[in-house]
Image (cartoon, rainbow, N blue to C red):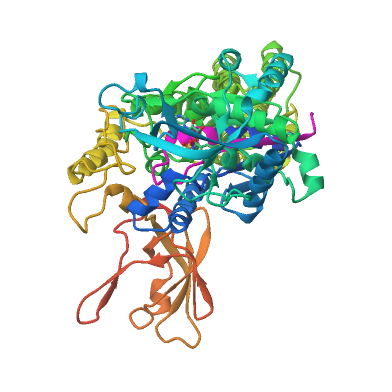
Amino acid sequence: MAKGKYYITTPIYYPSDRLHIGHAYTTVFCDAIARWRRMAGEEVLFLTGSDDHGQKVQRAAQSKGMTPKEYVDHIVPTFKELWRRLDVSYDDFIRTTEPRHIRVVQEIFQRLYDQGDIYKGSYDGWYCTPCETFWLESRLGEEKVCPDCGRPVEWVEEESYFFRMSKYADALLAHIEANPDFIQPESRRNEVISFIQSGLEDLSVSRTTFDWGVPVPFDPKHVTYVWIDALSNYVTAAGYLQDEAKFNKWWPADCHVVGKDILRFHAIIWPAILLAAGLPLPKQVYAHGWLLTDTGKMSKSKGNVVDPIRLIDYFGPDAIRYFLLREVSFGQDARYSTEALVERINADLANDLGNAFHRSFSMLKKFCGGVIPEPADPEELDTALQALAEETFRAVDGAVRSLHVNTALAELWKLVRAVNKYIDEARPWALAKEGDSRRLGTVMYHVFEALRIIAVLVTPFMPRTGQAFWQQLGQSGRVEDQGLAASAWGGSRPGTAVQGGEPLFPRLDVDQVLEELLGEAAEKDQGAAGGAQDGGAPGTRGGATGPSGVNVTGGTEGLITIDEFAKVQLKVAKVLEAEKVKGADKLLKLRIDLGSETRQIVAGIAQHYSPEELVGRSIVVVANLQPAKLRGEVSEGMLLAASDESGRLALLTVDREIAPGSAIR
Ligand code: MSP
């Protein structure tokens, strides 16, 4: 198996409370690749982060009555929460406001200035602040609005420093031509080549009209313009100017994964800066397509975004991960709709994958006492399944390494379907009936060996599913710790007791899903009186096909939107233990079961409930509160209770048995 190291990056995201499932695509895509390579035994540096500076951020903060720093500090934890919920395993999260980064930006700027690659000049033109783009007058029409987002553009005239990008055009072209994989996919590479051939202009790299940025070291009334600041995050995180050994190890990056809208920044501006700074170029820049809704590209500025947290809560993280990874083809756009999502879940997860496991569990229980049998000599049907399992590893590995993650899943599902077909053809039920235990043993061994391999190979894409199947198969430890080597044929030990378990992906009824999700959207629309988006454009109504999070603010003072409410994670928790907190008459300390974890919470209910009467009850807790310390005891969450004016207190509980950890919506 290939060893080595791999440095992969997502773009750093603008701090905004409107992250959507399109953003989640890039991150989940990088995560699957990072996880695959880690399981292959490679050392991985997977970087994501936030692009904290810029005029857009400064204005958004102003509109909320915050300082830019307060604003970004408030938003960034919500990114991290989204990545946590999607099981994104980044190794480093960089913020461009960190001292380690500011130093790097200033040094690069200074170096380029000292060597004459940055010079002072001035520019003027029509500028769209939300899109951070200059437009030619001919593109604007009479109303002078941005051709991309439809908002008014501004005439700006400013003194600015310029980067002599034109000087590096030839070197860059030569590099792109000599390295066919440098820009992927091929069609995008060709676009970049023709863009460079049409002539590169020098680039404005500083601003004086706002101050939320890294000051130019030798002229602090200028701040560095957002792209030089943003792009150099990739070298900062690799240790540039801080840790030489680390930097030599990780730089150049193996792959910058970006959306097609920011390819030119990564495939032209960034390499030109690196050439000027005398640093090696990243090995690859890969531009993926966009996730579209029926109303066009999801975008924070257009307001047709789909709230990922709502989707994750509803469908679970692995269903969303699978959909994103399977649906988006290499470099192409893909369409998001709730119907398409439900269809994928039903066809690929409930039907193909779920069936392969669950029919096998029940057959093993019924015919073999739930224990993996000893195989006898294989027949052709069996060796064909083994050959396919071995071939599947190679195909998935090749596809992941060439960034064709959707193909990787398609290859893996060939094996999933082949297991179902194998069962249909080998007919274990008939063998059991005939009493052919030798052949039955061989067949069931082959089925469970293929399932074990599927559990290993599916893990980088759907980590929770891989682990759940691994346990259901009676295997011990964490599947990701086994590495991809565990997908070699023959790892199942005859005699292993298989536990089985509940289906992970029950079939969904599309009408019910639409009603539940659109019901929410409709409620939300009622509360939304068509307010402003990111300080400007009117919100677009959600299409009829999905839970397009219509992030419209406004309405009556004091009311909150459904999205604001959705930020509070309410869950059912079972009280496992309860005791008084020493030295505090009002506090009880509870250990609660939240399904996937247990936690301690501290609650001020000791004068109303005894510890004994709480144990075993299912209560309601806020699960995403920042931890606090009360009388020296850590409280990771808060239980809910009602109190009336007389001081009586009543605990919120659920009115029938439901699994701990169930979400309350
Ligand atoms: N801050 C810059 C990136 C700087 S990198 C040095 C930025 N941020 S962003 O938050 O606007 O976008 C981050 C990424 O999300 C981009 O790669 C963008 O293409 C991607 N996406 C935004 N909307 C998307 C879809 N609807 N579909 C797929 N990707 C999308 O750009």
- Quarter of the rendering occupied by the N terminus: top right
The reply to whether residue 143 is in sight is yes
Q: Is residue 491 left or right of residue 590?
A: right
- The image shows residue 255, relative to residue 596, as above or below, that is above
**Quarter of the image where one finds residue 199:** top right
Q: Position of residue 487 (x, y in %)?
A: 71, 30
What residue appears at the point 44 percent right and 52 percent down from the top-left corner? Answer: 75
Please tell me which residue lies in front, 224 or 391. Answer: 224
What residue appears at the point 35 percent right and 18 percent down from the top-left corner? Answer: 138
Q: Is residue 5 left or right of residue 664?
A: right
Q: Position of residue 268 (x, y in %)?
A: 61, 25
The reply to whether residue 492 is in sight is no
Q: Is residue 84 left or right of residue 391?
A: left
Magenta stretch contains residue 515: no
Query: What are the residue bounds of the magenta stretch?
Result: 1-28
Please tell me which residue lies in front, 393 or 330. Answer: 330
Q: Is residue 588 left or right of residue 199?
A: left
- The image shows residue 537, relative to residue 329, as above or below, that is below
Please tell me which residue lies in front, 91 or 374. Answer: 91
Q: Position of residue 650 (x, y in %)?
A: 28, 72
**Quarter of the image where one finds residue 251:** top right
What residue appears at the point 71 percent right and 43 percent down from the top-left corner? Answer: 238
What residue appears at the point 19 percent right and 79 percent down from the top-left corner? Answer: 645
How many dots with numbers?
Answer: 0
Magenta stretch contains residue 4: yes
Q: Position of residue 441 (x, y in %)?
A: 67, 26
Please tell me which residue lies in front, 22 or 302. Answer: 302
